[in-house]
Amino acid sequence: MTASRPLIPVGRPSSVFDSVGGHETFTALVDAFYDGVAQDEELIAMYPEGLELDGAKWRLQAFLEQYFGGPTTYSEQRGHPRLRMRHAPFPVTFDARDRWLTHMRAALDAVALPPMYDELMWDYFQRAATAMVNTGDGDRQPPGPLL
């Protein structure tokens, strides 16, 4: 009988989470993101707790860490992410999406990930932010259902 080999070679990161530096990197990303959000009067007005962002920071960080292959703390404590459902009570317009993305882009720039991981995460953030749009603003209407 032959011993099975691990799918991931020993010493190599097994996930995006590990590859970008783990918990410390996600803490830096989320802190930089919320530093921007806290300065954005239009966006911060959407947060029920206002400038008390500890809960929002925890939720975003735990979600991102899980999504990118880290600990499953988010689902263990909050269940399935259900992003659209959780954002449904808030009028997420294209302007709000663009503001959110502006602060996330600045946060990604601040943590200076290797280009491959920056592009991978930026792609996800753009798609996820657009999927959260649920209210039109002006001539711009929300996207239809994702098929």
Image (cartoon, grey):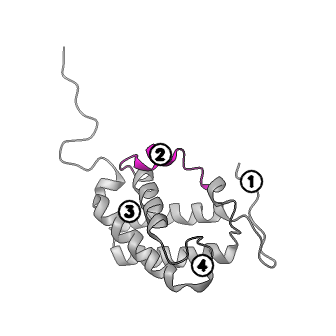
Do the residues bearing badges 4 and 2 touch, measured as CB atoms within 8 Å?
A: no
The numbered mark, 4 or 1, whose residue comes first in the sequence reads 4
Q: How far, Cα to Cα, is label 2 from label 3? A: 23 Å
Q: How far, Cα to Cα, is label 2 from label 1? A: 24 Å
Identify the residue position indicated by label 2 in the image.
75
| Residue 63 colored in magenta in the image | no
Helix, strand or loop at mark 4: helix
Helix, strand or loop at mark 2: helix
Q: Residues within 10 Å of mark 1 (few under 14, many from 20)?
A: few
Going by the numbered disc 1, the residue's amino acid type is Pro
The magenta-colored residue range is 69-83
Q: Nearer the viewer, residue 133 or 16?
A: 133
Q: How far, Cα to Cα, is label 4 from label 2? A: 26 Å
Q: How far, Cα to Cα, is label 4 from label 1? A: 24 Å
* Residue 117 disc label: 3
Identify the residue position indicated by label 1 in the image.
145
Q: Position of residue 142 (x, y in %)?
A: 75, 66
Instruction: Tell which tag, 4 or 1, sits nearer the viewer.
Output: 4
* Residue 11 disc label: none
Going by the numbered disc 3, the residue's amino acid type is Tyr
Identify the residue position indicated by label 4 in the image.
43
Helix, strand or loop at mark 1: loop
Q: How far, Cα to Cα, is label 3 from label 4? A: 26 Å
